Amino acid sequence: MFPTLSPLQRRRGFSLPETLVTIAVIGVLTAIAIPQITKTDQAAKAEVANQVVTSINRAVSAYRQCGTEITITANSGSGADEASIMSLLMTRDAGVVGTPFLTGSWPSVATDNTQHHRAQWNGRFFVVIPPGTNGTGLRINGI
């Protein structure tokens, strides 16, 4: 009267234990992967900040090679010194070959937010202030 079904025909879907095991495995893999991705992201941001500051320091070096020293002293409590130097480097001077020494979009907003990478003038050249460190500098945009 009732047709006989083979075991493959009777089984349609996953059992509860199979589903729970699958979810547990996915959860463990996620718990392992997310911290690794976060570390990679932080390392990439630090590398970008270092490259930006290296480019700015090259422009500072080129400015000095034209015979003018930057006499702005470091003031870690204000971003005014950094902004003044960036203005010097991005200004076209008809009498100086190579100006402006920096073109394009460069950091211009001073911040003391410890969550951002910042470029700070130390009296001689720019240094990177990493997140979690106190101090005012120009926020390195995009990171």
Image (cartoon, rainbow, N blue to C red):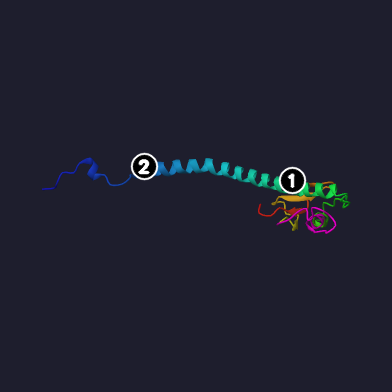
User: Hey, what amino acid is under mark 2?
Assistant: Glu
User: Hey, what amino acid is under mark 1?
Assistant: Thr
User: Front-most of 101 and 34?
Assistant: 101
Is 113 magenta? The answer is: no
Q: Position of 91 compared to 16: left or right?
A: right
Which secondary structure, mark 2? helix
Return the residue at label 1: 54
User: Front-most of 66 and 18?
Assistant: 66
Real-space CA distance between mark 1 and mark 2, rounded to the nearest whole angstrom: 54 Å
Residue 37, percent across and down? 57, 44
Residues packed near mark 2 inside 10 Å, few (<14), some (14 to 19) or many (20 plus): few
Residue 78, percent across and down? 82, 56
Residue 37 visible in the shown view = yes
Q: Quadrant of residue 10?
A: top left
Q: Residue at x 31, y 47 (%)?
A: 13
Mark 1 against mark 2, which lies toward the viewer? Answer: 1
Residues packed near mark 1 inside 10 Å, few (<14), some (14 to 19) or many (20 plus): some
The disc label shown at residue 92, or none? none
Q: Main secondary structure of the magenta part?
A: loop
The disc label shown at residue 18, or none? 2
Q: Residue at x 26, y 44 (%)?
A: 11
- Specify start and end residues of the magenta stretch as a single range: 85-104
